[in-house]
Amino acid sequence: MVQSLHRSIALSLCLAVCLSLYGFMERTADAARLKDLTSIAGVRDNQLIGYGLVVGLNGSGDGNNTGFSSQTLSTMLRSMGLTIDAAKIRARNAAVVMVTATLPPFARAGGQVDVVVSSMGDAKSLQGGTLLLTPLRAPNGQIYAVAQGPVSIGGFAAGGKSGSRVQQNHPTVGHIANGGLIEGEVGVQFNGREHLRMILNNPDFTTSIRLVDTINAQLGSDVARAIDSGTVEVRVPEAYRANVATFVASLENIEVTPDNVAKVVLDERTGTVVIGENVRISTVAIAHGNLSIEIKEEPQVSQPAPLSQGKTTVTPKSDVKVKEEGKQLILLSQAVTIRDLVRALNSIGVTPRDLVIIFQAIKAAGALQAKLEIM
């Protein structure tokens, strides 16, 4: 009897632990790290752009009708001490390009970044080309990096004299891994800050309040406060103000369950439908069917009788068929979860393209409790 009682108590404790673990897993299943939900104000990428020249092309460069290509080549040669009239330059082995790169935050002089090279003229391909030294500027006109190196296009293009052409990927856009050398630094004062502002990637009041509550629960009360739906201000403790990076590292791994707006995204071009978890519909009845009309034209030849001096005539014969797919009226009760909604729509055999029309009709009827976004 005592052993049976102990066994029952052990089973009860085991069941309680399992339920607690299941509840914990269920609560944290949708949690995301702070570093995936927000960014720090002032810590961002910077876009760079430059105008350059790719040489070494095997006759696939800019044609003679591209005036700025020959002008660019003439200007470059003049800077090297060789003067040539731009009108006399006929170089099919060069192409003018725009060079773009992204300067990451806290990038230091001597570091490297990837660059993208894009043709501006009528070049056929940048395969085998080399980008000459190109300054990369920010919108303020200051040079922050220089780019140079062999261009990799990851594709090819070939054509014959008859006009036939085979192409894979985009041969007029190339990539240079670590092709940009950082020369200038973007000054960002990080240490010594008393406050940090966290910018939510998807502004939402509920998410910002949850974020504030979680930070205050782990780091102490009144550390964080919500300014609006997209900004949370965090006070840096005095012990971390000389090394704010350590404090940010501790913030980044805090997990918060974000809240999302109920939304249905429709792409009419591809028939893609994405339904958010919180989408609900009111009770509504749906009947969906397809009406198809098929028309066939078959010419009928009429031959005259022998020696009747008649003429052979052709008379058209039309065969029209109308087919309407029978669909019964389905009553969709108010869905509790997205699983119920999908099951209800699948019960009437709809396709993704049918869903585009159905959701538009449900929204027009006022029964869709979600935002409808059409791409």
Image (cartoon, rainbow, N blue to C red):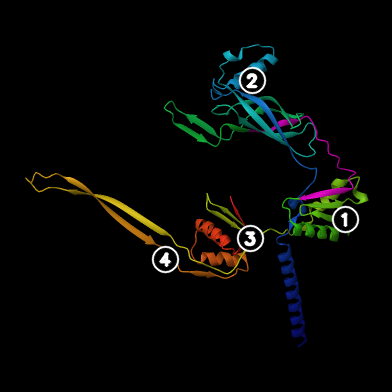
Q: For the residue marked with disc 2, what is the amino acid? A: Thr
Task: Give SS at disc 1.
Answer: loop
Marker disc for residue 370: 3
Q: Is residue 67 above or below residue 338?
A: above
Marker disc for residue 223: 1
Q: CA distance from mark 4 to mark 1?
A: 63 Å
Graded by Cα atoms within 10 Å as few (under 14), some (14 to 19) or many (20 or more), the crowding at tag 2 reads some
- Which stretch did the figure color magenta? 175-199
Which tag is nearer the camera, tag 2 or tag 4?
4
Q: CA distance from mark 3 to mark 1?
A: 35 Å
The mark that comes first in sequence, 2 or 3, is 2
Q: In which quarter of the view is residue 254 placed?
A: bottom right
Kindly identify the residue that appears in the image at 76 percent across and 33 percent down. Answer: 111
The mark that comes first in sequence, 1 or 2, is 2
Q: Which of 316 and 30 lies nearest the eye of the viewer?
A: 316
Relative horizontal placement of residue 262, taking residue 250 as reference (left or right)? left
Which tag is nearer the camera, tag 2 or tag 3?
3
Q: Quadrant of the N terminus?
A: bottom right
Task: Give SS at disc 4.
Answer: loop
Which tag is nearer the camera, tag 4 or tag 1?
4
Which residue is labeled 4 in the image?
Answer: 326
Which residue is labeled 2 in the image?
Answer: 72
Q: Whole-percent x and y of residue 283?
A: 58, 69
The mark that comes first in sequence, 3 or 4, is 4
Graded by Cα atoms within 10 Å as few (under 14), some (14 to 19) or many (20 or more), the crowding at tag 1 reads some
Kindly identify the residue that appears in the image at 28 percent across and 53 percent down. Answer: 318
Q: Is residue 66 visible?
A: yes
Q: Is residue 256 visible?
A: no
Q: For the residue marked with disc 3, what is the amino acid? A: Ala
